[in-house]
Image: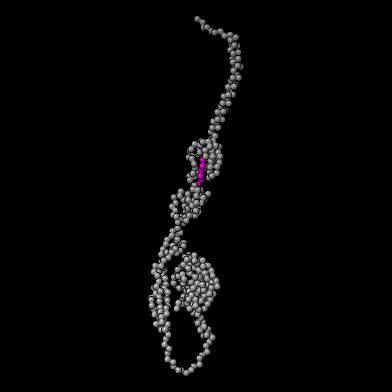
Amino acid sequence: MGIFHQEETHDSNISSMSYALRWKHENLRRISTAAIVSIAVIIMVLLLVSTQTLKQVYLVVDGQVKSIQTHKSSLQEMLDEQSISLRPEDQISMPLSGSLQDGDKVVIDRAVPVSLTADGTTKQWNSTGDTVGEVLKEKGVPLKETDKVTPSLSEQITGPTDIRIVHTNKQVVQRHESLPYHVIKTADPSLTAGEVRVVQQGKPGVMVQNIEKVYHDGEMVSMRMVGKEVQTKTQDKVIAVGTKKKPEPAVVKTASVKPKPVSASSSNKAVSSNNRVSKAGVDFSYKKVINVSMTAYSAEEPGIGTRTATGTHVTEGRTIAVDPNVIPLGWWVYIEGVGFRRAEDTGGAIKGNKIDIYYDSVKRANNFGRKSGLKVYVIGPVKPEVN
């Protein structure tokens, strides 16, 4: 049995080729149009994807705003892209791993070096506090109302800052001062002239002064008197002085003796010893009269003590500082316009005809100021009393 073979003719091959050419010719335009459209779609998709991944982010560093365009999806990636490094103390408004969105605002507050000196030690760290007060609060530094902080707590922190805390303590102590009594002489006609009798014994008083001492970091820097009160009043000593005339002695005739001539020096002494004047209702003799310039001082001033050069306690209304070469220490004087005062103290600046008058209050001492041309009667070691 033979095998049947389909008969292929030359006409059938030509017909197939003609059909293919005709189909290609008819669909070439369609193929080209489809290819162009496909490419355009791909380009548009790529552009759309690119546009959607590009973000505009606003970065604020220490108040300075910077606009950044980035394709990065996280904050850390964007900072790496911009070569921005952070320290552990820096503050940032969002996590480094946070996802970035278009229009995001990221705030970075960089820490600055701060040093703190207190109690003799110095500490250093980095802080993002805006003021000195915030920096100390951030570090948990305790403060008292009396502490002195430099710079002030409200001072703005704009760069490296040195802070100093001085612990201030105040202490009020009591100091007892002795108040000397006065000696009052009274006339007693029952006693013969020259005789004296103690009518009342004198007793010194006691004054309590409240002294405020100020300490900086345990070291005393100043002290001042903030108040005083008399605890025990003084009791003046009263002495009766006889005024009754002595009986005249019997007259005895004697040979006449030619009196000696009085020398000029002895005559001057007699005149000097008889110099008398009445001031403030008191008659008294004086040794000399001088003109002086006057200032004032107070124990409230730093470095001024209450003990005088003569060992007494400074007393307003009595104590003055003098030059001992002009007015002997312990002597009384009468100052025109001021009154009786006693030379009890000295001073490095008190030289020549100069007097420093004592006041308890430094305000009154300052108000006294400087006076010149004042007349001073130098009396002696005994204060004149009212007769």
Q: Decide whether residue 110 is among the magenta residues.
A: yes
Residues rendered magenta in the picture: 106-111
Coloring basis for residues: one colour
- Residue 111: image location, x then y, percent: 50, 47
Residue 1 magenta-drawn? no
Residue 346 in view of the camera:
no
Q: Quadrant of residue 182?
A: bottom left
Q: Is residue 267 visible?
A: yes
Residue 347 shown left or right of residue 30 in the figure? left
- In the picture shown, does residue 101 fall above or below 318? above
Please identify the quadrant where the C terminus is shown: bottom left
**Closer to us: 282 or 25:** 282
Above or below, 60 relative to 36: below
- Identify the residue shown where x is 46% and y is 94%: 254
Could you say which is closer to the camera, residue 327 or residue 291?
Answer: 291
Where does residue 90 sit, x and y in percent of width and height?
Answer: 49, 45
Q: Main secondary structure of the magenta part?
A: strand
Q: Position of residue 330 (x, y in %)?
A: 46, 75
Q: Position of residue 295 (x, y in %)?
A: 52, 69
